[in-house]
Image: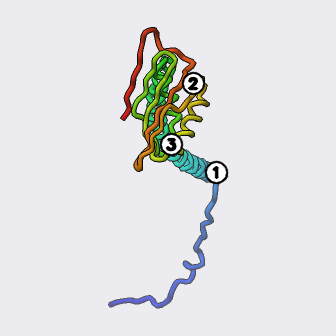
Amino acid sequence: MIKVNLIVDHTARGRRVSVKPTVSRMGLVYTAALLVTAAGLGAYWYVLNRQVNTLTATRDQLRAEDQRLKGLKAKLEQYEKMRQVRQSRIDVIEKLKESQTGPVLLLNHVIQSIPRDGQMWLSTLSQKGERVTISGFALHSDVIPDFMSNLATTNVFKSVELELIQEDKDAARFSLVCMTTQKSPRGADHGNKHP
């Protein structure tokens, strides 16, 4: 035979004891200290991360600036070499100018006196003592007086006189006699022909 108890024992239900959790003060202190430490470390990490990012950006800018400055330095060195080469050439030219004497200076003054329009060219230039003879051709005879006045203003010639002028239909042939203030070297007779 089977017995079934249909009466429920209600007394067992009422005896339940509720358990209240207890929190120790030391646990709260440790938890608060842990939270404060975690917050401090988080803030410290955030600050360090921002500084790292800022310093990385600054480093990249400085590297780019360094590359730009290296390029400028290379260009500057190249320009300095070019300047030194140019200066050495200028020094050679100045030295040659300083060492010019007699016929070279005379020829320079005559060449500078020729009108720049290309209507005149010289065929001969000769010097005997103080006498300088200049011969040439001009497309128009009206440029010859300009040439003579240019020669007179160089302060190299005491006098500039027209010796000969012959006009053809294509060109005018002329010859000038000039007296120079500079004598040719002793016993030297300089004759230069120019095409």
How far separated are the C-alphas under marks 3 and 2? 21 Å
Which residue matches tag 2?
157
- Name which residue lies at 53% across and 33% down: 162
* Residue 91 in view here: no
Q: Which residue is mark 1?
A: 36
- In this figure, which residue is indicated by the disc labeled 3? 116
Q: Residue at x 49, y 15 (%)?
A: 129
Residue type of the residue flagged with mark 1: Val
Give the x, y percent position of residue 18: 60, 70
* Secondary structure state at the residue bearing disc 2: strand
Mark in front: 3 vs 2: 2
Alpha-carbon span between mark 1 and mark 2: 105 Å
The local crowd at label 1, few if under 14, some if 14 to 19, many if 20 or more residues have their Cα within 10 Å, is few
Q: Quadrant of residue 24?
A: bottom right
Residue 116, image x and y in percent? 50, 42
Which of the two marks, 3 or 1, is nearer to us in this view? Answer: 3
Chain-order first, disc 1 or disc 2 = 1
Q: Nearer the viewer, residue 133 or 34?
A: 133
Q: Quadrant of the N terminus?
A: bottom left
Please name the amino acid that badge 3 sits on: Arg
Residue 157 in sight in this render: yes
Mark 2 is on which residue type? Phe
Q: Quadrant of the C terminus?
A: top left
- Under circle 1, the secondary element is helix
